[in-house]
Amino acid sequence: MNDKVTNILLVGVGGQGTLLASEILSETFMLAGFDVKKSEIHGMSQRGGSVVSHVRFGRAVASPTVPEGEGDVLFGFELLEAYRYLPLLHAGAKVVVNDYRIPPPSVLLGQEVYPDDLADRIRSRFPDFLLVDGLHLASEAGNPKAANTVLLGAVSKRLEIAEEHWLAALHKMVPAKALEVNIRAFQMGRAL
Amino acid sequence: MDRAILSGNEAIARGAYEAGVKVASAYPGTPSTEILENVINYSEIDASWAPNEKVALEVAIGASFGGARALACMKHVGVNVAADPLFTLSYTGVRGGLVLVVADDPEMHSSQNEQDSRNYAKFAKIPMLEPADSEECKEFTRLAFELSEEFDTPVMLRSVTRISHGKSIVTLGERVDNLPAPALVKDAAKLVMLPGNARVRHPKVEERIVNLSRWGTTATINRSEMRSAELGVICSGVVYQYVREVLPQASILKLGMVYPLPHDLIRDFASKVKTLLVIEELDPFIEEQVKAMGLQVTGKALFSLCGELSPGRIRNALEQGGLLAKVVSAPVTVEKLPPRPPNMCPGCPHRGVFYLLNRLNAYVTGDIGCYTLGFLPPLNAMDTCVCMGASISNASGIVRSLPREEQQRVVAVIGDSTFLHTGVNSLMEMAWNQAPATVLILDNRITAMTGRQENPASGFTLSGETAPEVNIADLCRAIGIKHVVTVDPYDLVATRAVLEAEMQRPEPSVIITDRPCCLMKGECRFEKGKILAVDQNQCTGCKACLRIGCPAIEWQPASDGKKGKAYIDPLLCTGCTVCQQLCKFDAIN
Ligand SMILES: Cc1ncc(C[n+]2csc(CCOP(=O)(O)OP(=O)(O)O)c2C)c(N)n1
Ligand code: SF4
Ligand code: SF4
């Protein structure tokens, strides 16, 4: 094990499930024998505001937040939010984003437009970019609510952690009745 | 031994359990709320919500006087409410250990100010511990109870958002089981704080803080980590983690107890390093005391008094101060994007009310809760917001300064939890002095903003047991308000009529809305609710429905130069019908 700490940022809109996803990531890294820290914001921003969670793992982790500009992996639940937080990444970071848009208030009111070329803009800066049709794949897996798990699968492929730890974390964190669909969704994401 | 990833709040709850705590009381407030929500999982602890922080602390004090270990938790501004008992508790001291956990919110992620609670420890002359990760949250909580009993003092444990809502690995321990059994003991000289007794207690308080400072010099929670002799940093809490990240070579004096300071230890550390820095969030709390010791130290000359620190902010400040070489990097930048502020949920019972207040040109003295979001566009219907309970008393004061025509526009808006927190006192003043303003109590049956905690009007306790519900209408009448009306906030016509009538009344009056928060289980899609859609043939593009700012309604501009149309997202709509009532063209069905 080297001393490098791996920095993951989960970004999206309050209420989208970033908290649970970051929980599963942390559990996986602990099971894999790493030190883990994570940080997130509850409260006001969870009412549909912009949210970011930080998860870090390595031999020993100090700060619970990712130092600015040192993000290794961006796990985006929504396009505009994924784009907003790009400055937290370093130039060679990997980016996995749900192909999903949630219009912010000014767009709902018709005062601003939701940029339609965000995926291209991200790809032009971060060649290691994957756009995932989470909703569609999750429906195929059996439940559109498992979209986050599809993304998690895709993210897992970009981290050097044995599959058994991911599966063990899913078994621990996902309610029994939803487990089968989520394992399927995870595998579909991992295959991307 | 068992290990688990716990948040700071979960770890504090675990620490309370392991310390043998018997009674815990709190009022919710971000980022402290989850402490009590986790304490309730330990059946050995009697945990319950209090209507406000003063009461929560007093419940804990009572338990301590009975001889049990007791915990009170609150957010930083909660200590303002609880300050009265706190300052005299410092004189009485404790019987069973008493720990007050305070969670600060530097950066104001979810707060109305970013006051630095460390000042309270100095002001009340009691010790304060500050953990730097979840493991320390648990260990310091245990230690805080021991210190409390050993030094006969309440102990404050300070967390911040990044600690409370950060997670790290914790090793779980056992609950202590050798504590003395609680019992009633008469000890008036210690527990009855009248002048004669308090004069005897005060010198003990002063002596105690000197003894604690001496204890801190050898205590393992204050530790110096000697590395390079060039630069030494004094820090505590989460800032310690940032300093480790940015200055891996620097020597560090990590303070686990931020008040009182271990003077001898600080002097010793300072003598071993060439340059001495204090890096701390918010106030120059440690810096000023180190300066008062006559030591050369730099702190707020480099670091901001505002907001939280982060590895990046510390690095920038050190680079600017010439203490760290500049790293050349080409940071990724993005152009300005549409912002995404929080918003009330689709179908929130508060939304239509704010729409009406806006239409009626009301001047709204506001309060704190989900409904504070009513100040945002397009509702723009809140004009003041100071602290919990202030809406009613602010209205009472503002009408006294106004001519009659203007008085009629003043409406105080307050939630049920906030009303029962401190709004009741304000309403007594309004009734007593007959201030002619209208009070609107948005009774959604729950403390929604902080994540739906029970309150005295909910009919349930923290543990889910049924409980008497405060009848808010009867309470207002009992206080002396003659005109109390209850209205369905989803019925815009009825609500408007009531608002107009009560605003005109030259006497105090109260309007209560009676629909639950739509995130409450089972009550989300209320009885008549069916998901609505915009008939694209009927929609004239008048934008009337957009004026309520429901997240489910989107404006879709037309590509061919014609007028755009509104669209309702079926995944988000709850069928509350508020938008439908605004559509003059029957386009929403
Ligand atoms: C003194 C103090 N304690 C706690 C808080 C945290 N807090 C903010 S709003 C709120 C309660 C909101 O409940 P309610 O008034 O019922 O309104 P709702 O959110 O349900 O609409 C609380 C506890 C605070 N801001 N100040
Ligand atoms: S949580 Fe409840 S009260 Fe708060 S915005 Fe949502 S529906 Fe309204
Ligand atoms: S009925 Fe209208 S206002 Fe209510 S949730 Fe649906 S779209 Fe929003």
Image (cartoon, grey):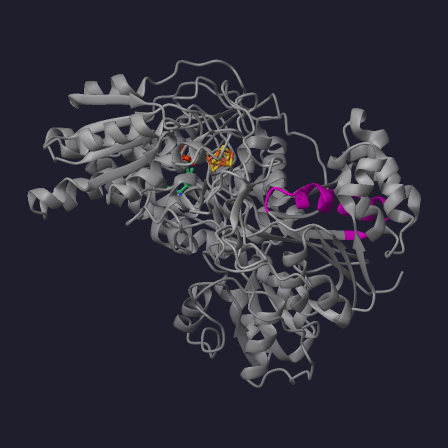
Place of residue A134 in the rendered image (x, y in percent of width and height, measured from the top left) = 77, 45
Name which residue lies at 26% across and 16% down. B474
Question: Is B499 on the left-hand or right-hand side of B241?
Answer: left
Place of residue B214 in the rendered image (x, y in percent of width and height, measured from the top left) = 49, 56
In the displayed structure, B550 sits above or below B290; it is above
Residue B16 lies in quadrant? top right
In the displayed structure, A46 sits above or below B63; it is below
Question: Is B67 on the left-hand or right-hand side of B206?
Answer: right
Question: Is A17 on the left-hand or right-hand side of B96?
Answer: right
Place of residue B520 in the rendered image (x, y in percent of width and height, measured from the top left) = 53, 26
Question: Is A67 on the left-hand or right-hand side of B16?
Answer: right
The answer to which of B207 and A64 lies nearer the viewer is A64
- Magenta stretch, overall SS: helix
Q: Magenta part of the protein: which range?
A: A14-35
Name which residue lies at 74% across and 52% down. A99
The answer to which of B39 and B424 lies nearer the viewer is B424
Place of residue B138 in the rendered image (x, y in percent of width and height, measured from the top left) = 63, 42
Name which residue lies at 45% across and 52% down. B211
